[in-house]
Amino acid sequence: MNADKTQMPEFSAERAVEIALERLTASDLVHAMLKRRGVDKITIRPVEIKNRRMVQISTFDGRKTDVQNYLPVDLKSALQGVLSAPFRSLFVSTSTEETQIQFSKKGRPMIATKKRNAEVVPNLKHDRTIQRPLPEGTPDSFLQKIGMMTADGRIKADRQ
């Protein structure tokens, strides 16, 4: 094992959730991803909205994404709700370390922490462009003929 990567001793599931909550509410949070059994995926990241630092929680259930933004004072209660349901794995990245928590099939948590060599600064940009396989704004005659794209190069809403 590398010198900069440490395996934490075995913990109970409750202690693993406490550790997760500590890391997720850290002021230097960069990014986090939580996966539940099935298709649920939750992404947590800091954002800046109207010159106020908030934390964005995006929940993807396999069909749609639900996004909510929280002030730091409201974050802990929101995260307790997220962490109350059993999850398969959690990856939390802060500016100085990365923590990974995984649960075995029997429900035992495995926790690993890795220190970073250099400090990372989070991207606080709120509005990001969505990467799509077909770029919008560029008309394509074939896609227009088959009815997927409008004349101005936008993909029709019912075809996305």
Image (cartoon, rainbow, N blue to C red):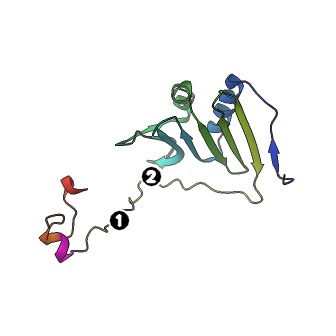
Q: Position of residue 53 (x, y in %)?
A: 53, 44
- What's the distance in space between the residues labelled 1 and 2, CA to CA? 22 Å
The residue at the point 49 percent across, 40 percent down is 42
**Of residues 49 and 128, which is closer to you in this image?**
128
Residue stretch in magenta: 138-143
Taking 154 as reference, is 10 above or below it?
Answer: above
The residue at the point 19 percent across, 70 percent down is 143
- For residue 84, which quarter of the picture? top right
Mark 2 crowdedness (10 Å alpha carbons): few <14, some 14-19, many ≥20: some
The residue at the point 52 percent across, 35 percent down is 36
Toward the front, the furthest residue is 105
Taking 22 as reference, is 45 above or below it?
Answer: below
* Residue at image mark 1: 133
Q: Position of residue 20 (x, y in %)?
A: 65, 34
Q: Position of residue 17 (x, y in %)?
A: 65, 28
Q: Which numbered circle lies on residue 113? A: none
In the rendered structure, which disc, 1 or 2, sits on the residue that comes first in sequence? 2
CB contact under 8 Å: marks 1 and 2: no
Residue 152 visible in the picture: no
* Residue at image mark 2: 126
Q: Is residue 148 left or right of residue 42?
A: left
The residue at the point 64 percent across, 41 percent down is 27
Q: Is residue 127 left or right of residue 160?
A: right
Taking 85 as reference, is 68 above or below it?
Answer: below
Q: Secondary structure at mark 2?
A: loop
Q: Position of residue 92 (x, y in %)?
A: 64, 44
- For residue 35, which quarter of the picture? top right
